[in-house]
Image (cartoon, helix red, strand yellow):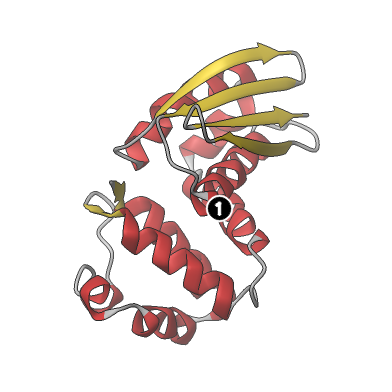
Amino acid sequence: MEVKGTAIKNTKEWVKKNYGENKWQEIVEALPQNLQAEMPDGYVFSGQWYPFKLFETINKIVIDKIGNGDEKIIFKAAQEGARMNLNGVYKIFMKMAKPAYVAKKAALLYNQFYNFGKMEVISLKEGEYTFNLNFVDNIPILFDRIAGYMEGVLTETNVKNPKVTFTYNPSAQKATFTARF
């Protein structure tokens, strides 16, 4: 299982912006040696694939060192990551795009960040969108990141008060995300 460097870089930029370079270095130093070796000096290449374990461990350290054990910090970081990614021309496009159009692209976006699981749109009702992420283990950190990112993207489409939640069905190996606005 691998994750694109962009996902890790979002976390890095969020940490640096809100807590400073020293806090990012503290997170990198808290990584086990084998994972530190994946990103020498804490540098992350956006287009490179990294082991999911690195991504997961960085997020667990963020929960401990910044969130004081509160996992909601991951959701918040992903929301801001979405907004940071959508700048310039993309931001203008998002303000004009219909939320349903953006939702349809969600499955494609998932596959640009992760090389496991399969995201699909289940329904696009007025004010409520449902997505399934199939063929995945129960990884709450991943689900919080996805839900936070979705909420951040929907915010950029001028949707009022979006709220994204998720549930996990272990027997189906499926996470279901519901976006309401």
Q: Amino acid at mark 1?
A: Ala
Residue pointed to by mark 1: 78
Specify whether 8 is left or right of 33.
right
Task: Report the front residue among 39 and 97.
Answer: 39
* x then y, percent, for residue 172: 49, 26
Residue at 65%, 40% in the rendered image = 151
Residue at the front extreme? 171
- Compared to residue 107, the image places residue 149 above or below, namely below
Specify whether 62 is left or right of 110.
right
Q: Quadrant of residue 152?
A: top right
* x then y, percent, for residue 155: 68, 39
Specify whether 15 is left or right of 25.
right
Classify 10 Å Cα crowding around label 1: few (below 14), some (14-19), many (20 and above): many
- Compared to residue 145, the image places residue 159 above or below, namely above
Task: Report the front residue among 156 and 70.
Answer: 70
Residue at 24%, 80% in the rendered image = 33
